[in-house]
Image (cartoon, grey):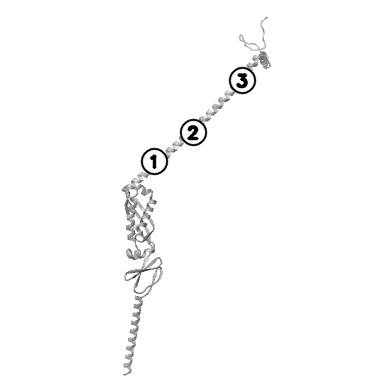
Amino acid sequence: MSFSTRYVTNERLNLGTIFFDVLKLIVLIFIVMICWPFYSVATGSRGVVTQFGRIVGIEGEGLALLPPWQKLSVFSIRSEQADIEGAEGSTSDTQPVKVSMTVRYSIAPDRVSEVFEKYSHDGNLSSYVQTATQEIFKAVTARYTATDLIAQRAKVSSDINLALREKLAIYGAQVINIDMRNFSFSESYMHAINDKVTQEQLRLAAENKLRTVEAEQKQKVAIAEAEADAQKARADGEAYANLKIATAQAGALEIQNKALAQNKDVLELRRIEVEKIKAERWDGKLPEAIYAGAPIPFLNVGAPK
């Protein structure tokens, strides 16, 4: 065999070896990919392990090691959100009402297997939550009149929350919270409500004004009564004082009368005292005009005896 022939043969053998090596590597990579045993479960999730379509276990967060004949499905237990726009209901007095709500929920960790098998492979129950919320809203609003529905909105929200918790528990979900917004009635009813509120405000204003007037009138009456009592008290005081003065004067006169009755000379002594005072005050002039019968000072001419 010539040198050139041996060289070609060796090259062919080398190429064949390289080909088989590459093929082995490809087959090995393929086998590893098929039989890869390492899986990871993200935070806020659970791994549902199935074997030929049957659930055989639930893996927690972190690394999971599975044989090639088993499959891992990631199932979220994080908070999910369902928006319900324009849910309709009717009050006990047949008033139509609408509301928009946002319901936040999550899958109970101990119900993952049940929910995966019956309702959802990824933990999304939005369609179930929307349907259940609309049913609950209709049932709850039917218990209230339109007026009570407005006045007791907090209680209505609480009733919806409690009823929805029971309803979603059937699907393995737990309610985190409910945000109820855009609570509205028909346009005609809202106009009637506004008119009623306006009338109520006017009525309250009138009552307040009436109470103010009554208070002012009572105050005036109280002031007038107080003034009347004060005047009466003053009059009573003056009358009592006058009575005391009169009593004193009467007592003095009575004493004088008794004294005069006992001693006749007292009256003459007083007359003399008066005449003495007149004499002290006389300036010595006689009056220019004397009328008949008028007394002349200090001329006491007695009748001839």
Q: Give the quadrant of residue 249.
A: top right
Give the mark, 3 or 2, whose residue is nearer the N terminus.
2
Q: Residues within 10 Å of mark 1 (few under 14, many from 20)?
A: few
Residue 129 relative to residue 242: left or right? left
Q: Residue furthest bottom?
A: 1
Report the amino acid beneath label 2: Ala
Q: Circle 3 sits in a helix, a strand or a loop, which is it?
A: helix
Disc 1 marks which residue?
Answer: 203
Q: Nearer the viewer, mark 1 or mark 3?
A: 3
First-in-chain label (1 vs 3): 1
Judged from the image, the secondary structure of the residue bearing numbered disc 2 is helix
Q: Is residue 86 visible?
A: no
Residue 251 image label: 3
Which residue, given by chain and number where applicable, does mark 2 sit on?
A: 222
Q: Which mark is residue 63?
A: none
Q: Is residue 59 above or below residue 294?
A: below
Q: Position of residue 116 (x, y in %)?
A: 34, 65
In which quadrant will I find the C terminus? top right
Callout 1 touching callout 2 (CB < 8 Å):
no
Does 89 sit above or below residue 56? above
Classify mark 1: helix, strand or loop.
Answer: helix
In front: label 3 or label 2: 3
Query: For the N terminus, which image quadrant?
Result: bottom left
Q: Nearer the viewer, residue 111 or 234?
A: 111
Residue flagged by tag 3: what amino acid is it?
Gly
Q: Image height check: is 194 above or below 134?
A: above
Type of amino acid at the residue the image marks with label 1: Arg
Q: Viewed as shown, does residue 154 lie left or right of 254?
A: left
* Residue drawn at 49 percent across, 33 percent down: 222
Give the Cα distance between marks 3 and 2.
42 Å
Does residue 228 appear to the left or right of 99 in the view shown? right
